[in-house]
Amino acid sequence: MGRQRPETPTLEEVAALAGVGRGTVSRVINNAAGVRESTRRAVQRAITELGYVPNLAARSLAGRRADAVALVMTETDWRMVGEPFFTEIVRAVGDALADMPATPVQLLLTLVRTDAERRRFVEYARGGRVDGVLMMSVHAEDPLPDMLAEAGLPTVMLGRRSGEESVTYVDADNTGGARGAVAYLLERGRSVVATITGPLDMYVAECRLRGYREALERAGVEVRPSLVVEGDFTQESGRRAMTGLIERHPELDAVFAASDSMAAGALTALLAAGRRVPQDVAVIGFDDFLLAEHTEPRLTTVRQPVEEIGRAMVRLLLEEMEDSAAAWRHVILRTELVVRDSA
């Protein structure tokens, strides 16, 4: 449970600030005749100062909804849109919405990358065009979740920006999943274990790196910075990272990659270097999407409960749409190590 969200300005507050009645504010909002220009300006100043959004308030008062939610991706790299993780999440969220017994809800996919796009999206959402917002691929300094919360828009994130997140989110146990994967490698006699991280301005990547370090420390194994290489969750970044690791540490005998895509890239690099998997180098990924079943050899990986994540995101968003004063909630779901041929 978190703090209560800030309340959105009301029609009554606008009226009090402008020194007029509620009906006068409504007439100004609706551009009705019979309002003095000085009064109209006072109301408009109050609306601006309070950040009041007439369209959203009018829709709420009328008891109507847009019957649509936005799924926003804030990733600046277009390549990420095609990554298995994001396509699986879109499918899981879409399935969860389709299974709703009440009025069908339209899912709108939106890419928001720049400050200008953030401002436009917030205004679009505040105007009553969507009932709530789901977010994924949020980086550490992204202000969009706070902008949406300040606007009073129900918002649920996939993952979080930091350990002190104050917006509702659903996440997997990234630290525990990574720690278990690396412990598995160490327990089976691997001694030089490298890791390929995700982009470290994302909390998910920090957590998986933390799990890697914790597993080594618990086993009394030195954490060597030269065995840690940053990727960007793509297959190509995994290939490049693995190539560099082999050159620097020909003795390495295991690698934990923070996504299945990067693990698949690592397999390509190991094959090119003449290393056998798992005989020479064991490989573990993270996600357990369809890709993991079709690599050669098949990937041992940490499974995220994607279906459960999608259902939880939708459930929390619907609850926030029904009760805008509800406390922010944080949900962390268990992961599972799936052992296949690569480790």
Image (tube, grey):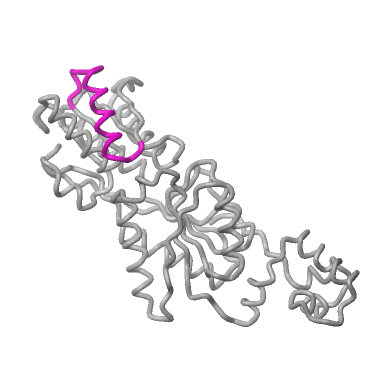
User: Image point 22% across, 44% down: which residue?
Assistant: 301
Residue 194 in percent (x, y) is at: 27, 27
Residue 234 part of the magenta-drawn span:
yes
Q: Quadrant of residue 327?
A: bottom right
Q: In this orientation, which residue lies closer to the viewer: 6 or 3?
A: 6
Principal SS element in the magenta part? helix
Seen in the picture, residue 341 relative to 85 is either above or below; the reply is above
Seen in the picture, residue 190 relative to 319 is either above or below; the reply is above
User: Image point 20% across, 23% down: which residue?
Assistant: 191
Q: Which residues are magenta?
A: 232-253
User: Image point 62% across, 76% down: which residue?
Assistant: 60
Residue 86 in percent (x, y) is at: 34, 53
Q: Quadrant of residue 22?
A: bottom right
Is residue 152 shown left or right of residue 76?
right
Seen in the picture, residue 263 relative to 335 is either above or below; the reply is above
Residue 69 in percent (x, y) is at: 47, 67
